[in-house]
Amino acid sequence: MDTALSDPSAAARKTERLSVCVFCGARPGTSPEAVRLAREAGVTLGLHGHDLVYGSGGAGLMGEVARGAMSSGSRVTGIVPRFLYELERADQADTDEMIITEDMFDRKREMIRRSDAFIALPGGYGTLDEILEVVSLNSLGQCPKPLVLVDLDGIWEPLTALFDRIRAGGFFRQSAEAPFHLAGSVAEAVEFVERHTRSAADTVRVGA
Ligand code: AMP
């Protein structure tokens, strides 16, 4: 049965236009599958009527996500610190709006503040840092917005195992919810954020 029929609030959520922040690598990685996944993530957001917030890179997976989103009708907002603008080819980024921040901290704050939900694809230190920022703020009740990790080739499994270890060691609150959802596909990730994003009125906005 269509959940929108059985749950009227699901229908409202489905039609809501979300700002979804995608965290992913500034490099393409070694697997062509990662590039395909990034393009698919952008295209899927656009086809579902959502907007993209991202790190404004013109190359690597970041560039693919933006081109995919732009090609399927998303409004794309890129957020980049001044010192990375040239390094990460932000001049070649496909954006409707580009926000240049003073530093990495401001960039993260803006990405988090402007987004309703987060999807992480494969990436490096930067992606990991962004994931942990959201997890950490979320655990403090400062960012109650869904975070989904798309697990291409098991890249995020060790992180899941690490969180399980920390939980077993008693370093999380007992009541703490799972810090993120692990998705096997882009479609699953987008459906998850659509089902779990609260209305903006219920959401504590970081820096707002
Ligand atoms: P990455 O996942 O490392 O490819 O990077 C994703 C975004 O985070 C890019 O804009 C990177 O420049 C940025 N970034 C790169 N390295 C770091 C780092 N060590 N800490 C925080 N962000 C980074």
Image: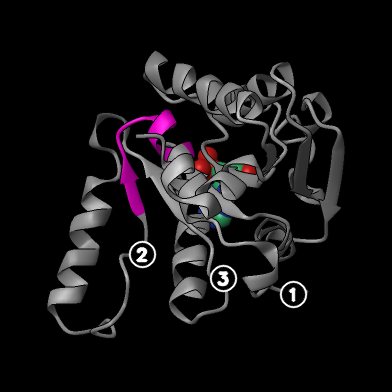
Q: Is residue 123 visible?
A: no
Image quarter hosting the C terminus: bottom right
**Res. 115 image quadrant:** bottom right
Task: Name above or below for residue 13 compared with residue 166.
Answer: above
Counting from the top left corner in percent of width and height, residue 71 is at 71, 16
Distance from disc 3 to disc 2, alpha carbons, whole Å, reads 11 Å
- The three-letter amino acid code for the residue at tag 2 is Pro
Judging depth in this view, the residue of 116 and 96 nearest the camera is 116
Q: Locate residue 79 relative to residue 8 in the image: left or right.
A: right
Dot 2: within a 10 Å radius of its alpha carbon, few (fewer than 14), some, or many (20 or more) residues? Answer: some
**Res. 97 image quadrant:** top right
Q: Which residues are magenta?
A: 181-190
Q: Locate residue 151 relative to residue 73 in the image: left or right.
A: left
For residue 207, the mark is 1
Task: Name above or below for residue 176 compared with residue 105.
Answer: below
Counting from the top left corner in percent of width and height, residue 152 is at 32, 31
Q: Is residue 187 magenta?
A: yes
Look at 78% across and 25% down and name the residue there. Answer: 94
Among the two numbered marks 1 and 3 on one chain, the one whose residue lies closer to the N terminus: 3
Dot 1: within a 10 Å radius of its alpha carbon, few (fewer than 14), some, or many (20 or more) residues? Answer: few
Among the two numbered marks 3 and 2 on one chain, the one whose residue lies closer to the N terminus: 3
Which residue carries the number 3 mark?
A: 143
Counting from the top left corner in percent of width and height, residue 132 is at 45, 63
